[in-house]
């Protein structure tokens, strides 16, 4: 028997805290004590629990977990004291003692500044269309400071009082979506109260602001893939309408959650279309986004039915649109993009761009397949590693 990895209880704790804060927000909203901001309930307090700190400060997380257990124990004592009158004082005493002895974490570490939109979720579903809309907004309103590649080296950035951050880093994964939204809508100040980043609430409506956040994530992935060979933040397979031969179009979301998905960029030559493969569903991305007229048998024929798909997938892969044909991306069963093969014949687990940061563990890989040791081709090894190392997502911070 071995103790569960710290990740398991930490994830449970963070989920609990997140749910508790959301429940409180809903209650306040229901009672009419807080209104709406940007179309969703407004967080009425200036602070919130710093999930992102707990994620890296295991000691603090343990203190909090023990204190919560002490509170639960004290509540249980209260119930017992209420039901079992004879020993009432003793039970109340034990409960109070638990509260006194609990290792209460310091509120200064536990809490962090919150914005009214801290707990808001993006309504966009990270779709190809919103990423394309976001790209246009970014080019017009943000690239001058943040740079076309998002590394903070735009033509204006040298004149600013503080340098814009690079998005090709874990930054966007660490911040809760709602706080990115707030920073873009309201702007940012430095410690002395000087404006560092302008606010865009007057120029961009809510939908446009969420769209530009989708694009920032895609940009972070593309720049990371092109320059560092990895995706700095976990990314979902973007939503797009799928058109399969002889069937009505349907959302890609229907494929997620059950099957791995392989996305193959093809400029349309029917003989170059990839073969169907039982290990995943194949989605073709074509420059026009049009369904293919004739698909030879056994060849993959389902197409991403949007002309925006080509430039968006080129961006995610970190490849120029003119060089995209032949590139393939793999998404795991949970819908996370994991690997890229750029114009090569074979796959290997070196193609994994979204990893858990640990070297592959052969034992785990063999276990995931239910077999001991079998000769594996590069693609099978890659798929098994993807399955053995699932992406873990925590709101307000990613366990990756
Ligand atoms: C005038 C220059 C300028 C423009 C224009 C600008 N930014 Fe910024 N941005 C900055 C600076 C400087 C920072 C760093 C601010 C800080 O850390 O105090 C920043 C920070 C950010 C951050 C990081 C926020 C965080 O949580 O740390 C995001 C996201 C961002 N900008 C998005 C955008 C988007 C989207 C646009 C366009 C709609 C945009 N910016 C336009 C200068 C700019």
Image (cartoon, rainbow, N blue to C red):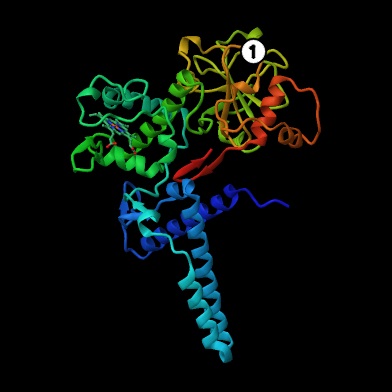
User: Residue 238's spot in the image, x, y percent?
Assistant: 51, 30
Location of mark 1 (residue): 273
User: Residue 18's spot in the image, x, y percent?
Assistant: 47, 54
Question: Vertically, is 393 above or below 129?
Answer: below
Question: Vertically, is 21 above or below 252?
Answer: below
Q: In the displayed structure, does residue 119 sit left or right of residue 93? A: left
Q: In the displayed structure, does residue 75 sit left or right of residue 365? A: left
Q: Residue at x 18, y 39 (%)?
A: 194
- State the SS at label 1: loop
Other-residue count near label 1 (Cα within 10 Å), few / some / many at <14 / 14–19 / ≥20:
many
User: Residue 364's spot in the image, x, y percent?
Assistant: 71, 36
Count of residue discs: 1
Question: Vertically, is 297 above or below 93?
Answer: above
Which image quadrant shows ligand 1? top left
User: Residue 137's spot in the image, x, y percent?
Assistant: 32, 27
Report the quarter where the C terminus lies: top right
- Among the 4 quarters of the image, the one containing residue 188: top left
Q: Which of 295 and 45 lies nearest the eye of the viewer?
A: 45
Q: Residue at x 25, y 24 (%)?
A: 157
- Label 1 residue near ligand 1, CB within 8 Å: no
Q: Residue at x 41, y 43 (%)?
A: 176
Q: Residue at x 79, y 36 (%)?
A: 370
- Among the 4 quarters of the image, the one containing residue 273: top right
Q: In the displayed structure, does residue 229 sit left or right of residue 150? A: right
Outermost residue, bottom direction?
A: 86
């Amino acid at each position: 028997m071995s103790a569960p990895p710290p990740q398991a209880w930490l994830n449970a704790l963070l989920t609990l805290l997140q749910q508790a804060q959301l429940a409180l927000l809903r209650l306040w909203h229901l009672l009419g004590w807080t209104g709406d901001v940007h179309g969703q309930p407004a967080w009425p307090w200036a602070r919130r629990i710093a999930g992102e700190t707990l994620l890296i400060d295991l000691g603090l997380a343990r203190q909090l977990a023990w204190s919560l257990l002490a509170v639960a124990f004290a509540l249980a004592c209260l119930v017992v004291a209420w039901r079992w009158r004879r020993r009432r004082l003793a039970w109340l005493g034990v409960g109070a003692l638990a509260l006194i002895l609990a290792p209460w974490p310091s509120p200064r570490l536990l809490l962090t500044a919150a914005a009214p939109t801290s707990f808001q979720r993006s309504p966009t579903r990270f779709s190809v269309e919103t990423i394309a809309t976001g790209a246009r907004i970014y080019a017009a309103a943000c690239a001058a400071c943040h740079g076309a590649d998002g590394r903070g080296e735009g033509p204006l950035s040298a004149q600013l009082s503080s340098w814009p951050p690079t998005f090709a880093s874990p930054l966007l994964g660490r911040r809760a979506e709602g706080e990115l939204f707030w920073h873009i809508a309201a702007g940012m100040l430095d410690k002395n109260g000087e404006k560092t980043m302008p606010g865009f609430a007057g120029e961009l409506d809510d939908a446009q602001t969420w769209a530009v956040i989708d694009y920032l994530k895609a940009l972070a992935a593309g720049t990371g893939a092109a320059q560092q060979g990895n995706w700095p933040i976990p990314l979902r397979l973007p939503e797009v309408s799928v058109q399969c031969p002889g069937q009505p179009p349907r959302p890609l979301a229907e494929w997620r959650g059950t099957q791995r998905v392989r996305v193959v960029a093809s400029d349309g030559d029917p003989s170059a279309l990839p073969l169907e493969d039982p290990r995943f569903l194949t989605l073709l991305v074509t420059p026009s986004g049009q369904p293919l007229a004739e698909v030879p048998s056994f060849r993959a024929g389902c197409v991403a039915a949007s002309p925006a798909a080509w430039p968006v997938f080129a961006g995610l892969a970190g490849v120029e649109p003119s060089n995209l044909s032949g590139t393939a991306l793999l998404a795991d069963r949970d819908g996370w993009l994991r690997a890229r093969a750029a114009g090569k014949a074979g796959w290997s687990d070196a193609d994994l761009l979204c990893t858990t940061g640990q070297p592959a563990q052969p034992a785990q890989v063999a276990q995931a397949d239910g077999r001991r040791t079998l000769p594996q081709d590069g693609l099978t090894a890659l798929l098994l590693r993807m399955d053995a190392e699932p992406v873990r997502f925590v709101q307000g911070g990613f366990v990756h």
